[in-house]
Image: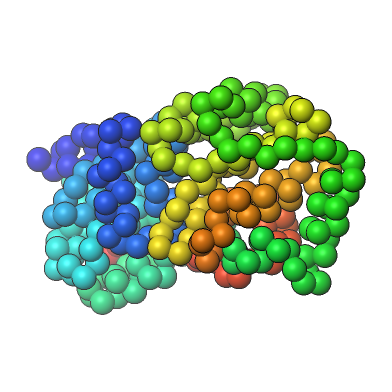
Amino acid sequence: MLQTILIDKDISINDKECFDKYFETADVLASEMTFTNFFMWKDYYKIRFRIINDFLCIMSVRDNLTPFCFFPVGDYKKGEELKKTIYTIKEYFDSEGWKLIFSRVTKQQMGILDELGIEYNATEDRDNADYVYTVKSLSTLAGKKLDGKRNHINKFKKLYSYEYEKISPLNIKDCKNIVEKWYSQRGQDNESLTHERTANYQLLDNYGLLGLKGALIRVNGEAEAFTVGEQLNKNTAVIHVEKANPGIHGIYTVINQQFINNEWLHMEYVNREQDLGIPGLRKAKLSYNPDHLIEKYTIEVS
């Protein structure tokens, strides 16, 4: 039993309902905790999963890299069941000669470990901290700190005519063309970009089945930007993808604001995921003046 407890099931599109149920029960905070995220990155992370004691347990078993788990997902009021689940996973890791590592763990989840009396060592994972903004801030771009963003939009509108479209089967091919342009401009020999391209295709090829919201911007009639997101929890949307032609001034700012105004005004927050430690991406995310970060940690269970 232990030999297959976490590695006997790959993710398929048919698992969405199961994942969604557990994520909703846990009222997740971290951007990773959506079925879409695990499905689109399943080939890169070599994701496996299993339900143990009514907790969704997800594991990454990449070749030649340290295996790790995401924190079990379920009803955290069931403390004893969660504790049994964690020790069951640890027993499996011990049997394989691995340390039990939980990755992308939030402060909320560390607090649960403390309540359960589980001993662990924690290391902050700043590169994977999520940037969370208020919908009001991204919608209006009001205030001195966002003067530059409003200027980008004003300049864009002076230079170009544009159209906003919801993503549908009629323009999925346009989105794929944007991905191909993005990929060719950034170097096709970059392994991480190749994986990102594959993940984007997984998302677009299954767009309708994943229940996502998305937007496409045409500039002077040509498809030049698209973005995709979904509801993460009761009051937060998460943005999974945002791709645009960098040669068009202000287009990223435009599609960001337009997507919020057309699809997410009923939410309170927008989680725009992490910066992965990339200096330019960190600067860009900070420039939007986040309301707060979702801090994450790597946990080694003693």
Along the line of sight, the residue nearer the viewer: 30 or 14: 14
Q: Left or right: where does residue 277 sit relative to residue 145?
A: left
The image quadrant that residue 193 belongs to is: top right
- Percent across and percent down for residue 53 are 13, 55
Compared with residue 176, is residue 262 higher up or lower down, i.e. above or below? below
Name of the residue lying farthest toward the left: 1
What residue lies at 72% left-to-right and 37% top-to-bottom?
163
What residue lies at 47% left-to-right and 26% top-to-bottom?
205
Q: Is residue 219 visible?
A: yes
Q: Is residue 62 visible?
A: no
Along the line of sight, the residue nearer the viewer: 82 or 246: 246
The image quadrant that residue 150 belongs to is: bottom right
- Percent across and percent down for residue 292 are 57, 70
- Percent across and percent down for residue 191 are 58, 30
Along the line of sight, the residue nearer the viewer: 83 or 270: 270
* Quarter of the image with the N terminus in it: top left
What residue lies at 34% left-to-right and 38% top-to-bottom?
47
What residue lies at 21% left-to-right and 70% top-to-bottom?
77
* Quarter of the image with the C terminus in it: bottom left
Compared with residue 251, is residue 13 higher up or lower down, i.e. above or below? above
Q: Left or right: where does residue 24 sit relative to residue 88?
A: right
The image quadrant that residue 196 belongs to is: top right
Label total for image: 0
- Percent across and percent down for residue 241 are 57, 42
Along the line of sight, the residue nearer the viewer: 14 or 187: 14
Q: How is the image coloured?
A: rainbow
